[in-house]
Image (cartoon, rainbow, N blue to C red):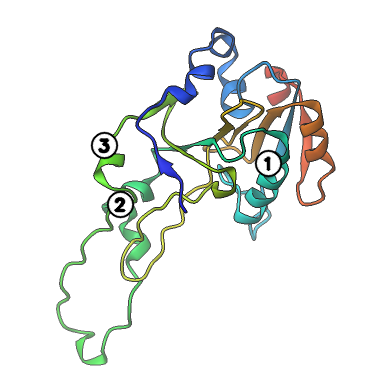
């Protein structure tokens, strides 16, 4: 079952309105998360075919491995929150995502190749109007759609397809945390690694997991340079 969109944003008050979080350097909040956790770690993103790391996104295998570890370090794995940056063009549909469906659908009949084609309707938004026009979470100098649900459903947004048989693959969560605030995960929209803050035991588990490429992170703005 996909995650459910939320109109009540109070679940984020604990870090959005926290004085310590507000006073932390913007780069730390965006790339590592709020202050106050015992330890922090970077989860490096997978590499593309040209050796570059994915920016702003954990692929399905990495997200599943991360979720598998996180599940053991919260008392509320079935009650978690997920924020998705609202600036992704494929979420809004229209001309911003039209190129993604330009060559989708069944092949044209040979006799119609040179005939004038009917205009193709632009892709619809990923979510219904009550979500697209609903309240947005403001955090880390960005705005996000907020969703809730079990940790196991991370990244399953319930997005509508593009049409013409083209599925819509939405980005992995940009922010993620459980109701008990045991840890916090942040993936910057242009970052090549995901920051995780939590207990020493959680960070130790992430560092030794062979499915993840990780490195310990100080909560120190200088360490991000």
Q: Is residue 131 left or right of residue 66?
A: left
Which residue bears the numbered disc 1?
71
Which residue bears the numbered disc 2?
93
Residue 139 appears in the picture as rendered: no
Q: Would you place residue 53 above or below residue 111 in this image?
A: above
> Residue 86 sits in which quadrant?
top left
Q: Are marks 2 and 1 in contact (CB under 8 Å)?
A: no
Disc 3 to disc 2, C-alpha distance: 14 Å
Residue at (17%, 75%) from the top-left corner? 117
In terms of sequence position, does the residue under pointer 3 or pointer 1 come before the other?
1
Badge 2: residue crowd in 10 Å (few <14, some 14–19, many ≥20): some
Q: Is residue 52 left or right of residue 40?
A: left
Residue at (83%, 34%) from the top-left corner? 204
| Screen quadrant of the C terminus | top right
Circle 2: element type: loop
Residue at (69%, 39%) from the top-left corner? 70
Q: Are marks 3 and 2 in contact (CB under 8 Å)?
A: no
Disc 2 to disc 1, C-alpha distance: 33 Å
Badge 3: residue crowd in 10 Å (few <14, some 14–19, many ≥20): few
Q: Is residue 54 left or right of residue 225?
A: left
Circle 1: element type: helix
Q: Position of residue 80 (x, y in %)?
A: 55, 36
Which numbered disc covers residue 19? none
In terms of sequence position, does the residue under pointer 3 or pointer 2 come before the other?
2
Which residue bears the numbered disc 3?
133
Q: Position of residue 167 (x, y in %)?
A: 41, 64
């Amino acid at each position: 079952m996909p995650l459910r969109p939320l109109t009540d944003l109070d679940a984020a008050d604990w870090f959005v309105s926290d004085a310590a979080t507000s006073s932390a350097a913007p780069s730390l909040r965006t790339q590592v998360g709020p202050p106050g956790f015992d330890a922090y770690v970077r989860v490096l993103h997978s590499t593309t075919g040209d050796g570059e790391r994915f920016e702003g996104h954990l692929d399905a295998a990495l997200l599943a491995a991360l979720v598998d570890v996180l599940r053991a370090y919260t008392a509320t794995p079935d009650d978690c929150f997920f924020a998705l940056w609202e600036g992704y063009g494929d979420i809004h549909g229209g001309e911003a995502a039209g190129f993604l469906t330009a060559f989708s659908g069944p092949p044209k009949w040979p006799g119609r190749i040179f005939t004038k084609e009917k205009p193709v309707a632009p892709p619809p938004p990923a979510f219904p109007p009550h979500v697209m026009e609903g309240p947005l979470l403001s955090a880390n100098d960005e705005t996000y759609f907020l969703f809730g649900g079990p940790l196991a459903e991370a990244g399953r947004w319930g997005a509508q397809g593009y049409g013409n048989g083209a599925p819509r693959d939405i980005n992995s969560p940009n922010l993620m945390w459980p109701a008990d605030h045991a840890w916090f995960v942040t993936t910057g929209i242009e970052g090549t690694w995901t920051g995780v803050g939590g207990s020493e035991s959680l960070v130790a588990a992430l560092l030794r997991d062979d499915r993840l490429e990780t490195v310990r992170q100080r909560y120190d703005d200088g360490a991000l340079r």
